[in-house]
Amino acid sequence: MIGLEDGNRLDRHWSKEKFTSCFVVLWPHLALKGHFFATQARYCQERGIDAKRTSMMYFWNGISSVLIRALTGYVCDKKGMHPKWIMQTAVFIAGATTVLSTLLYSYKQLLACYIAYGVADGAIISSMNILAMTTLSAKQRSQGFGFFHFCVAIALAVGPPFGGM
């Protein structure tokens, strides 16, 4: 727990700062995530991909996201692997696949990109929860975790309207 349990003033201060920085960095990503999911179906339709194949892209995105979440939790438990590194890598991959998806035209290319996004999304969610739980003291965890997910829900809800959906 990196010295968060002993409760001295410096540890509480640093844990709040880490929690806040984690939240501030992730909020824009989560807002854009909602916009990305909302626009992907229309983008596929513009590329001539039918609705059935587009829905399969959402299906495989979800399956890859769910499967990677358990693996990410296992990897985060390994000594020497910090959840922050996993989350940073996953956010980079999610951003790269979002940009790359605008350059792709075929169904197979978009499907591969969307599965990669699902993998990154699953890693982000798992590592984000671990970071939120480990950066706060035991006394602050329940309130901080609830507040964190309240803000995540707002970010996912406001993404599409701000994106023009």
Image (cartoon, rainbow, N blue to C red):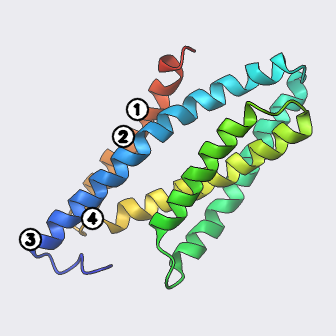
- Which residue is depicted at the point 74% across and 35% down? 101
- Which residue is depicted at the point 54% across and 14% down? 164
Q: Quadrant of the N terminus?
A: bottom left
Disc 1 crowd, CA 10 A, few/some/many (<14, 14-19, 20+): few
- Whole-angstrom CA distance, mark 3 to mark 4, is 13 Å
Amino acid type of the residue tagged 1 in the rendering: Ile
Disc 2 crowd, CA 10 A, few/some/many (<14, 14-19, 20+): few
Query: Looking at the image, which residue sits at the far front?
Result: 103
**Rendering quarter of residue 103:** top right
**Rendering quarter of residue 132:** bottom left
> Observer-nearest residue: 68 or 107?
107
Tell me, yes or no, whether the two marked residues, 1 and 2, touch with CB atoms within 8 Å. yes
- Which residue is depicted at the point 53% across and 20% down? 163
Mark 3: secondary structure? helix
Disc 4 crowd, CA 10 A, few/some/many (<14, 14-19, 20+): many
Horizontal arrangement in the rendering, residue 14 relative to residue 133 (left or right): left
Q: Which residue is mark 3?
A: 9
Residue 148, placed above or below residue 1: above
Percent x, y for residue 29?
Answer: 49, 40
Percent x, y for residue 131?
Answer: 40, 63
